[in-house]
Amino acid sequence: MLLVPIWDAVAFALWVASFFRGEVRWRNADYRIVEGQLVPIATPTRTADHASRFPASPEKLDSEAER
């Protein structure tokens, strides 16, 4: 029970600190916040992990095979 107030204090500190960051990671892409707008820092790269989680649909594979 003693850790509950400590956990709350750490969570609150992280929440407050998040307002002072100028960068955001969303859907594996990095953005910078400039004048209230999200500006991409770099384009996301397709990794082996991404490809294994989102395999191509069978219809797409069939259409590529016909070419």
Image (cartoon, rainbow, N blue to C red):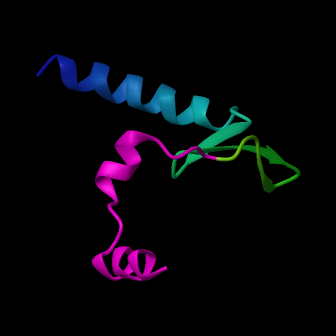
Image quarter where the N terminus lies is top left
Tell me if 13 is positioned left or right of 32 in this view: left
Q: Depth check: 42 or 21 in front?
A: 42
Asked if residue 44 is positioned above or below residue 18 in the image, the reply reads below
Q: Does 58 appear in magenta?
A: yes
Q: Image check: 59 left or right of 3?
A: right
Give the number of marks: 0
Query: What range of the chain is rendered magenta?
Result: 44-67
In this view, which residue lies farthest toward the right?
35
Q: Is the magenta stretch mostly helix, strand or loop?
A: helix
Q: Please determine whether, in this image, residue 25 is positioned above or below residue 21.
A: below
Is 37 or 55 nearer to us in this picture? 55
Percent coordinates x, y for residue 41 in the rendering: 76, 41
**Does the magenta portion include 46?**
yes
Please identify the quarter of the rendering in which residue 48 is found: top left
- Residue 11 versus residue 3 in the image, above or below: below
The residue positioned 38% from the left and 51% from the top of the image is: 51
Question: Residue 21's quadrant in the figure?
Answer: top right
